[in-house]
Image (spheres, helix red, strand yellow):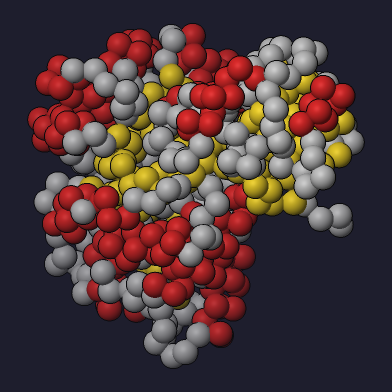
């Protein structure tokens, strides 16, 4: 994604202003924004102040005395009072529409026990009309103590259809009314790429996996365009409060349908409510006519800060109690009532020849491909498809990325660099947490030591970028991710850890969110570093992340978020 700006020519003309910390600026300005009295983190070290021009281009970085030479009577001066200034953060895998919609649904705290879930559903039913759908989430089998069933929901919602997503978003839990509304019975076959869980008598238990979720989703009234837009606007503001200046919506269509969501994104951009630079990944699956239509007409949605130039392909599920992530070796445990190949090794949702052909086609169209690939077999399939595209089309600046990468075979680490692909990791790794407990139980203690192998990826020379996967995770706050990438413990520190051998440094963690992510988006010439001539996408934080203890990183508070020189978020005093 190359964020459009009318000031590229100005950025080039201002290249003469590039000077080391302490040298006097040679440009003339004037500055419309001046930040002074803090720690401005640049590739060359820490400066005291910086100036930005009317087009959002960084004019100068240096001492307060030097930079103040660019000040005029109309310059806005921000006194930093010792705060730190960093490049804006990029989240390359996030679901803003889903996050906003979930806030208005029957939201359940992750890790809730069965009694708490039932109490929450009962509250939601009491507020709903008779027969109205109750939707929301999120639930975790490990927190419940077992894989739940429809009777547990029937007990508190006998007359309203209830349909709840689990934390991963790849499994859903329905009551009897919801199954009835969807026409799911013991005679309903499993759809291709999906599983309807059944009891010993063959009756549906109320748990659906992967594409089987669509059997119920088709009967749930989708959010209106107005509701979807309100949800998106709330999510965008929430993300600004955490210093996220660029992001990738990883799965357009997940919550309200592809055409509707794409239209809402366009409307929000046209109304000037999209401050961040956003890339849209349009969800595609073989035979999906709507996806092909939206992809073909994608340029109708393109705006200055909106780039629908990415295609999302789901290659597998998740390595939790569902056993749907595609693994090279068998899962450690079993799935009650199932003895199929999917229970042993998961599910690869797109056959390799078909995947190679699709990625080669999208690559030739200039579209970046983002894979959902949690299991090591799915990661290998995604890398192989990128290699097929390179062989057919040659190398380009498109950095196709393999998303999540919960498990990666050691022998596949070097392949990413070889084929010009990126590893996109979900670095919200705190433990203990219910979803991580589910993963540990599914794959075993030995394989969990290499979960999200960030250290090995970086050492292999791969381009590694971060994606929160919010609202699958509870918070979009990237500082939680920075800390847990460094400690692999609970925020604040904990006796337990998760993949401790894969820990990286603070410098490396922040680089994932800034320089690496900008490079992945194709905007490394404009974003990701604080230097004269670069665009002023910045975040002001209350502490120096390079100077505090690692277990305090998650406590970092964003004071200001700046995009193209415009202050788009300011934290007010409590």
Q: Position of residue 156 (x, y in %)?
A: 51, 78
Query: Relative to residue 471, is residue 77 drawn left or right?
Result: right
Of all residues, the one furthest to the right in this rendering is 81
The residue lying toward the viewer, choosing from 179 and 31, is 31
| Quarter of the figure with residue 558 | top right
| Quarter of the figure with residue 339 | top left
Total label count?
0
The residue lying toward the viewer, choosing from 455 and 319, is 455
Give the residue displayed 39% in from the left and 87% down from the top.
Answer: 131
The residue lying toward the viewer, choosing from 476 and 1, is 1
Quarter that holds the N terminus:
top left
Query: Relative to residue 326, is residue 147 drawn left or right?
Result: right
Q: Position of residue 224 (x, y in %)?
A: 39, 75
Quarter that holds the C terminus:
bottom right
Query: Relative to residue 47, is residue 104 drawn left or right?
Result: left
Tell me if residue 44 comes above or below residue 337 in the rendering.
above
Q: Position of residue 97 (x, y in %)?
A: 46, 59
């Amino acid at each position: 994604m190359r964020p459009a700006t009318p000031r590229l020519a100005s950025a080039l003309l201002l290249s003469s202003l590039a000077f080391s910390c302490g040298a006097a600026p040679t440009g003339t300005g004037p500055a419309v924004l001046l930040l002074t009295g803090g720690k401005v983190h640049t590739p060359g070290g820490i400066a005291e102040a910086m100036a930005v021009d009317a087009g959002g281009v960084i004019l100068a970085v240096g001492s307060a005395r030097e930079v103040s030479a660019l000040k005029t009577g109309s310059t806005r001066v921000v006194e930093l009072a010792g705060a730190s200034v960093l490049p804006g953060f990029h989240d390359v895998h996030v679901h803003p529409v889903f996050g906003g919609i979930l806030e208005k649904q029957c939201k359940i705290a992750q890790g809730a026990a069965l009694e708490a879930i039932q109490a929450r559903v009962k509250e939601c039913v009491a507020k709903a009309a008779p027969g109205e759908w109750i939707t929301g989430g999120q639930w975790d089998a490990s927190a419940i103590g077992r894989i739940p069933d429809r009777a547990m929901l029937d007990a508190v919602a006998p007359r309203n259809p209830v349909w709840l997503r689990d934390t991963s978003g790849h499994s859903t839990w329905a009551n009897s009314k919801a199954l009835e509304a969807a026409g799911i019975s013991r005679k309903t076959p499993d759809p291709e790429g999906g599983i309807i869980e059944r009891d010993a008598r063959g009756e549906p238990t109320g748990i659906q996996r992967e594409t089987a979720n669509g059997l119920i989703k088709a009967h749930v009234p989708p959010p209106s365009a107005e509701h979807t837009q309100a949800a998106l606007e709330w999510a965008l503001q929430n993300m600004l409060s955490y210093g996220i200046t660029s992001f990738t919506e990883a799965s357009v269509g997940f919550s309200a349908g592809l055409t509707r969501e794409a239209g809402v994104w366009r409307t929000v951009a046209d109304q000037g409510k999209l401050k961040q630079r956003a890339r849209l990944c349009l969800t595609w699956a073989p035979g999906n006519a709507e996806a092909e239509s939206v992809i073909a007409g994608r340029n109708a949605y393109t705006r200055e800060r909106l780039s629908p130039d990415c295609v999302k392909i789901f290659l597998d599920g998740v390595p939790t109690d569902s056993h749907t992530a595609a693994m090279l070796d068998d899962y450690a445990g079993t799935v009650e009532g199932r003895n199929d190949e999917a229970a042993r090794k998961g599910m690869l949702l797109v056959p390799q020849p078909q995947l190679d052909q699709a990625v080669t086609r999208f690559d030739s169209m200039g579209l970046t491909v983002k894979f959902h690939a949690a299991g090591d077999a799915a990661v290998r399939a995604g890398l192989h498809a990128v290699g097929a595209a390179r062989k057919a089309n040659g190398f380009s600046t498109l950095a196709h990325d393999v998303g999540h990468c919960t498990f990666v075979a050691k022998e596949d680490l070097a392949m990413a660099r070889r084929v010009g692909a990126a590893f996109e990791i979900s670095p919200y790794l705190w433990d203990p947490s219910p979803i991580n407990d589910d993963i540990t139980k599914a794959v075993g203690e030995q394989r969990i030591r290499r979960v999200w192998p960030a250290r090995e990826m970086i050492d292999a020379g791969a381009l590694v970028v971060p994606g929160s996967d919010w609202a699958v995770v509870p918070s979009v706050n990237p500082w939680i991710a920075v800390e847990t990438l460094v400690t692999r413990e609970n925020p604040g520190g904990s006796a337990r850890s998760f993949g401790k051998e894969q820990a990286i440094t603070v410098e490396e963690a922040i680089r994932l969110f800034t320089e690496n992510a900008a490079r992945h988006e194709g905007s490394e010439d404009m974003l990701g570093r604080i230097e004269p001539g670069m665009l002023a996408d910045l975040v002001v934080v209350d502490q120096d992340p390079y100077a505090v203890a690692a277990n305090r990183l998650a406590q970092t508070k964003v004071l200001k978020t700046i995009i193209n020189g415009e202050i788009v978020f300011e934290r007010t005093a409590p």
